[in-house]
Image (tube, grey):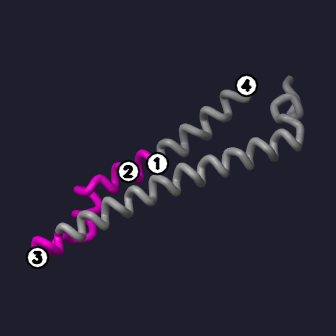
């Protein structure tokens, strides 16, 4: 029967892996968030120029912001999965 110590790396390796994962995820999520905000800003700016009545939800879905955020979050999940499997555990 496997022991817990067989499944987990030593403390320093584990802490380093967690820290690297967090830094990578923060960078990825930050980039995706900035892109989504830029897409929303462009949508609102265009709506104002056209004297339109564009709702927040419409801009969120039609500008690509929703897809950008979804892709960013999928990337975060993928990073966790890849890191987990690349460690050979």
Q: Which residue is mark 4?
A: 88
Viewer-proximal residue among 81 and 35: 35
Q: Tell whether position 27 is magenta.
A: no
Q: Is residue 61 above or below residue 3?
A: below
Label 3 Cα neighbours within 10 Å, binned few <14 / some 14-19 / many ≥20: few
Tag 2, which secondary structure? helix
Q: What is the CA distance from the residue labelled 2 to the residue labelled 3?
A: 26 Å
- The picture places residue 80, in percent across and down from the top left corner, at 62, 40
C-alpha distance separating marks 4 and 2: 30 Å
Q: Main secondary structure of the magenta part?
A: helix
Q: Which residue is mark 2?
A: 68
The C terminus: image quadrant: top right
Horizontal side of 9 relative to 46 (left or right) equals: right
Q: Which element is circle 1 on?
A: helix
Mark 1 touches mark 2? (CB < 8 Å) = yes
First in residue order: circle 2 vs circle 3: 3
- Which residue range is magenta in the image? 47-72
Q: Mark 1 or mark 3: name the one nearer the start of the chain.
A: 3
The nearer-to-camera label among 4 and 2 is 2
Q: Which residue bears the numbered disc 1? A: 72
Quarter of the figure with residue 56: bottom left
Asked if the residue at tag 3 contacts the one at tag 1, i.e. Cβ–Cβ closer than 8 Å, the answer is no
The 10 Å Cα crowd at callout 2, few under 14, some 14 to 19, many 20 or more, is: many
Rounded to the nearest angstrom, the CA distance separating label 4 from label 1 is: 25 Å
- In percent of width and height, residue 55 lies at 21, 71
Q: Which residue is mark 3?
A: 51
């Amino acid at each position: 029967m496997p022991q817990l110590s067989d499944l987990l790396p030593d403390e320093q390796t584990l802490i380093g892996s967690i820290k690297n994962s967090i830094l990578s995820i923060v960078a990825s999520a930050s980039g995706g968030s900035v892109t989504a905000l830029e897409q929303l800003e462009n949508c609102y700016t265009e709506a104002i120029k056209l004297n339109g009545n564009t709702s927040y939800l419409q801009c969120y879905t039609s500008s690509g912001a929703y897809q950008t955020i979804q892709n960013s979050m999928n990337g975060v999940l993928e990073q966790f999965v890849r890191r987990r499997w690349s460690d050979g555990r």
